[in-house]
Image: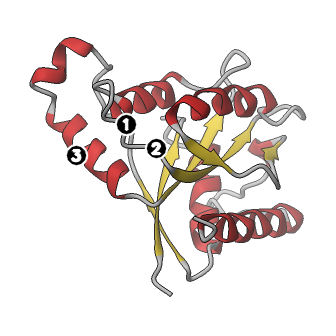
Amino acid sequence: MSKKKIAVLVGSLRKESVNRKLANEVIRLAPDSLELEMVEIGQLPHYNEDLDQNPPAEWVEFRKKIGEAEGYLFFTPEYNRTFSGVIKNALDVASRPYGQNKWGGKPGAIASSSVSALAGEGANLALRHPMVFLNIYMMQQPEAYIGKSWELFDEQNNLKNESTKEFLKNWIDAFAEWVYKF
Protein backbone atom coordinates (compact mmCIF):
# COMPACT_ATOMS: atom_id res chain seq x y z
CA MET A 1 0.00 0.00 0.00
CA SER A 2 1.45 3.35 -1.03
CA LYS A 3 1.43 6.29 1.34
CA LYS A 4 -1.28 8.88 0.88
CA LYS A 5 0.00 12.44 0.53
CA ILE A 6 -1.88 14.75 2.91
CA ALA A 7 -1.61 18.55 2.93
CA VAL A 8 -1.71 20.07 6.43
CA LEU A 9 -2.93 23.68 6.60
CA VAL A 10 -2.68 25.81 9.74
CA GLY A 11 -4.92 28.84 10.03
CA SER A 12 -2.87 30.73 12.58
CA LEU A 13 0.17 32.78 11.61
CA ARG A 14 1.44 33.37 15.15
CA LYS A 15 5.03 32.31 15.79
CA GLU A 16 3.91 30.31 18.86
CA SER A 17 0.66 29.11 17.28
CA VAL A 18 -1.01 26.36 19.29
CA ASN A 19 -2.62 25.14 16.09
CA ARG A 20 0.81 24.70 14.51
CA LYS A 21 1.96 22.84 17.62
CA LEU A 22 -1.09 20.57 17.39
CA ALA A 23 -0.45 20.02 13.68
CA ASN A 24 3.18 19.10 14.37
CA GLU A 25 2.05 16.67 17.08
CA VAL A 26 -0.39 15.02 14.67
CA ILE A 27 2.36 14.75 12.05
CA ARG A 28 4.48 12.90 14.64
CA LEU A 29 1.59 10.63 15.60
CA ALA A 30 0.44 9.82 12.06
CA PRO A 31 0.51 6.21 10.89
CA ASP A 32 3.03 5.16 8.25
CA SER A 33 0.23 4.97 5.67
CA LEU A 34 0.11 8.79 5.54
CA GLU A 35 2.71 11.28 4.37
CA LEU A 36 1.78 14.60 5.96
CA GLU A 37 3.26 17.84 4.64
CA MET A 38 2.72 21.26 6.15
CA VAL A 39 1.61 23.57 3.34
CA GLU A 40 2.09 27.22 4.25
CA ILE A 41 -0.73 29.67 3.54
CA GLY A 42 0.37 32.92 5.18
CA GLN A 43 2.38 34.07 2.17
CA LEU A 44 -0.52 33.83 -0.30
CA PRO A 45 -1.57 37.18 -1.75
CA HIS A 46 -5.28 37.85 -1.18
CA TYR A 47 -7.45 36.30 -3.84
CA ASN A 48 -8.37 38.78 -6.56
CA GLU A 49 -10.05 37.50 -9.70
CA ASP A 50 -8.22 40.12 -11.77
CA LEU A 51 -4.97 38.23 -11.09
CA ASP A 52 -6.19 34.92 -12.52
CA GLN A 53 -4.94 35.80 -16.03
CA ASN A 54 -1.40 36.09 -14.68
CA PRO A 55 -1.44 34.50 -11.21
CA PRO A 56 1.25 35.26 -8.62
CA ALA A 57 3.94 32.59 -8.29
CA GLU A 58 2.73 31.83 -4.75
CA TRP A 59 -0.71 30.92 -6.11
CA VAL A 60 0.74 28.71 -8.83
CA GLU A 61 2.88 26.76 -6.35
CA PHE A 62 0.06 26.49 -3.81
CA ARG A 63 -2.46 25.30 -6.39
CA LYS A 64 0.04 22.67 -7.53
CA LYS A 65 0.55 21.35 -3.98
CA ILE A 66 -3.18 21.28 -3.26
CA GLY A 67 -3.88 19.52 -6.55
CA GLU A 68 -1.23 16.88 -5.84
CA ALA A 69 -2.46 16.18 -2.31
CA GLU A 70 -4.71 13.18 -1.73
CA GLY A 71 -6.39 14.68 1.32
CA TYR A 72 -6.35 17.64 3.69
CA LEU A 73 -6.07 18.37 7.39
CA PHE A 74 -7.12 21.82 8.57
CA PHE A 75 -6.05 23.21 11.96
CA THR A 76 -7.97 26.34 12.79
CA PRO A 77 -8.14 28.80 15.64
CA GLU A 78 -11.43 30.50 16.35
CA TYR A 79 -11.53 34.19 15.51
CA ASN A 80 -14.85 35.91 16.23
CA ARG A 81 -16.74 32.58 16.21
CA THR A 82 -15.42 31.54 12.81
CA PHE A 83 -12.24 30.34 11.11
CA SER A 84 -9.34 32.56 10.15
CA GLY A 85 -9.10 34.74 7.07
CA VAL A 86 -5.92 33.03 5.89
CA ILE A 87 -7.79 29.72 5.61
CA LYS A 88 -10.60 31.42 3.68
CA ASN A 89 -8.04 32.96 1.34
CA ALA A 90 -6.35 29.57 0.81
CA LEU A 91 -9.71 27.98 -0.02
CA ASP A 92 -10.42 30.73 -2.54
CA VAL A 93 -6.98 30.67 -4.17
CA ALA A 94 -7.05 26.90 -4.82
CA SER A 95 -10.69 26.82 -5.95
CA ARG A 96 -10.39 29.49 -8.61
CA PRO A 97 -10.63 30.41 -11.41
CA TYR A 98 -14.18 29.07 -11.40
CA GLY A 99 -14.25 25.52 -12.73
CA GLN A 100 -10.64 24.77 -11.75
CA ASN A 101 -11.13 23.65 -8.14
CA LYS A 102 -7.99 21.86 -6.90
CA TRP A 103 -9.67 20.69 -3.66
CA GLY A 104 -12.48 18.60 -5.08
CA GLY A 105 -13.18 14.91 -4.62
CA LYS A 106 -10.73 14.34 -1.78
CA PRO A 107 -11.07 13.60 1.95
CA GLY A 108 -10.48 16.14 4.69
CA ALA A 109 -10.76 16.72 8.43
CA ILE A 110 -10.75 19.70 10.76
CA ALA A 111 -9.21 20.22 14.18
CA SER A 112 -10.07 23.42 16.01
CA SER A 113 -8.64 24.81 19.19
CA SER A 114 -9.27 27.66 21.54
CA VAL A 115 -8.15 29.00 24.89
CA SER A 116 -11.72 28.53 26.09
CA ALA A 117 -13.54 25.33 26.92
CA LEU A 118 -15.62 25.82 23.75
CA ALA A 119 -12.58 24.54 21.84
CA GLY A 120 -13.17 26.42 18.60
CA GLU A 121 -16.54 24.78 17.98
CA GLY A 122 -17.77 27.79 16.02
CA ALA A 123 -14.70 27.80 13.76
CA ASN A 124 -14.91 24.06 13.19
CA LEU A 125 -18.55 24.20 12.20
CA ALA A 126 -18.11 27.30 10.04
CA LEU A 127 -15.18 25.73 8.18
CA ARG A 128 -17.33 22.74 7.27
CA HIS A 129 -19.71 24.97 5.30
CA PRO A 130 -17.47 25.80 2.30
CA MET A 131 -16.31 22.18 2.12
CA VAL A 132 -19.66 21.20 0.60
CA PHE A 133 -19.18 23.57 -2.33
CA LEU A 134 -15.49 22.65 -2.66
CA ASN A 135 -16.43 18.95 -2.74
CA ILE A 136 -14.08 17.96 0.09
CA TYR A 137 -15.40 14.85 1.82
CA MET A 138 -15.14 15.72 5.48
CA MET A 139 -14.59 13.06 8.10
CA GLN A 140 -17.62 13.18 10.37
CA GLN A 141 -16.31 11.33 13.42
CA PRO A 142 -14.37 11.72 15.54
CA GLU A 143 -14.61 15.48 15.62
CA ALA A 144 -11.58 17.35 16.99
CA TYR A 145 -12.26 20.24 19.34
CA ILE A 146 -9.29 21.08 21.56
CA GLY A 147 -10.19 23.34 24.48
CA LYS A 148 -7.88 25.23 26.83
CA SER A 149 -5.21 24.58 24.23
CA TRP A 150 -2.66 27.10 25.53
CA GLU A 151 -2.18 24.94 28.60
CA LEU A 152 -1.27 21.80 26.64
CA PHE A 153 2.37 22.41 25.72
CA ASP A 154 5.53 22.92 27.78
CA GLU A 155 8.31 25.43 27.02
CA GLN A 156 9.90 22.99 24.53
CA ASN A 157 6.57 22.61 22.67
CA ASN A 158 6.02 19.09 23.97
CA LEU A 159 2.44 18.04 24.49
CA LYS A 160 2.05 17.57 28.25
CA ASN A 161 -1.40 16.04 28.34
CA GLU A 162 -1.43 12.29 27.68
CA SER A 163 -5.19 12.10 27.16
CA THR A 164 -4.93 14.79 24.45
CA LYS A 165 -2.07 12.89 22.83
CA GLU A 166 -4.16 9.69 22.88
CA PHE A 167 -7.13 11.57 21.40
CA LEU A 168 -4.99 13.04 18.59
CA LYS A 169 -3.55 9.60 17.83
CA ASN A 170 -7.05 8.13 17.58
CA TRP A 171 -8.17 11.08 15.43
CA ILE A 172 -5.32 10.75 12.92
CA ASP A 173 -5.75 6.97 12.81
CA ALA A 174 -9.46 7.45 12.04
CA PHE A 175 -8.50 9.95 9.33
CA ALA A 176 -6.12 7.40 7.79
CA GLU A 177 -9.01 4.94 7.57
CA TRP A 178 -11.21 7.68 6.07
CA VAL A 179 -8.56 8.51 3.43
CA TYR A 180 -8.31 4.89 2.29
CA LYS A 181 -12.05 4.71 1.69
CA PHE A 182 -11.37 6.91 -1.32
Helix, strand or loop under label 3: helix
Q: Earlier in the sequence, mark 2 or mark 3?
A: 3
Q: Nearer the viewer, residue 143 or 137?
A: 137
Q: Which residue is located at x 90 percent, y 35 percent?
A: 117
Where residue 45 sits: x, y (%)? 28, 24
Name the residue carrying label 3.
61
Q: Which mark is residue 104?
A: 2
Name the residue carrying label 1.
101
Q: Which mark is residue 60?
A: none
Q: Which residue is located at x 11 percent, y 22 percent?
A: 53
Q: Which residue is located at x 73 percent, y 40 percent?
A: 113
Quadrant (top left/top right/bottom left/bottom right) for the C terminus: bottom right
Is the residue 149 above or below the residue 32 in the image? above
Q: Amino acid at mark 1?
A: Asn
Q: Nearer the viewer, residue 42 or 87?
A: 87
Do tag 3 and tag 1 residues touch (Cβ < 8 Å)?
no
Distance from disc 3 to disc 1, alpha carbons, whole Å, reads 14 Å
Do tag 1 and tag 2 residues touch (Cβ < 8 Å)?
yes
